[in-house]
Image (cartoon, grey):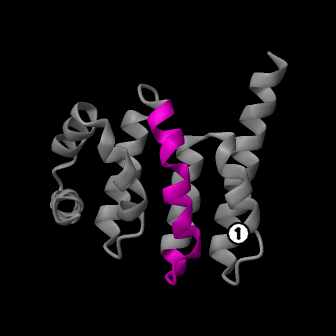
Amino acid sequence: MGQSTETKEMIADFMENGFLNDIIDMFKNNRKLFAFLGDLIADERGRVRIGTVALVEDLRETYPEELAGAIHGIAKSLKAANPIVRADTAYLLGVINNEDALPYLSKALNDENALVREAVEETIAFISDLSEEIGTN
């Protein structure tokens, strides 16, 4: 467990310091790191959360299964104490754009924070609209 914690901390610190390309390479070479996405989006440091979104944007076309597998861990942050983390989590789930996120997002529709509710609503609409487009083509 110690090595796992150290790895997460190292990735978050690299992310905060702007080493996104190094992190992207790490994820490409070790698919087990996708399990850390939930912890990264829950980080209180804004640069880490922004980097996490950029990371997923870079990886989403090539690694959709790995990202789908990370949805449950990511969705836990929809219950974070910090409303900015909750909103960023909703946005990240939209970037992943997988219907598996919809049940988690639906549970967050009544969030006490208006920013979070708006992010959740937009993400649900985005995922649902794309799902309908795919289904009709």
Q: Residue at x 20, y 40 (%)?
A: 26
Q: Is 14 located above or below residue 45 in the figure?
A: above
Depth check: give the residue in front, 66 or 82. 66
Q: In the picture, which quadrant includes the N terminus?
A: bottom left
Q: Residue at x 63, y 74 (%)?
A: 115
Q: Secondary structure at mark 1?
A: loop
Furthest-right residue in this view: 136
Which residue in the structure is indicated by mark 1? Answer: 108
Magenta stretch: includes residue 66: yes
- The span picked out in magenta is 65-84
Q: Where in the figure is residue 71, as x and y percent of width and height?
A: 54, 50
Q: Residue at x 51, y 53 (%)?
A: 92
Q: Where in the figure is residue 41, as x and y percent of width and height?
A: 41, 62
The amino acid beneath tag 1 is Ala
Q: Is 49 located above or below residue 123 in the figure?
A: below
Q: Where in the figure is residue 91, as x and y percent of width and height?
A: 55, 56
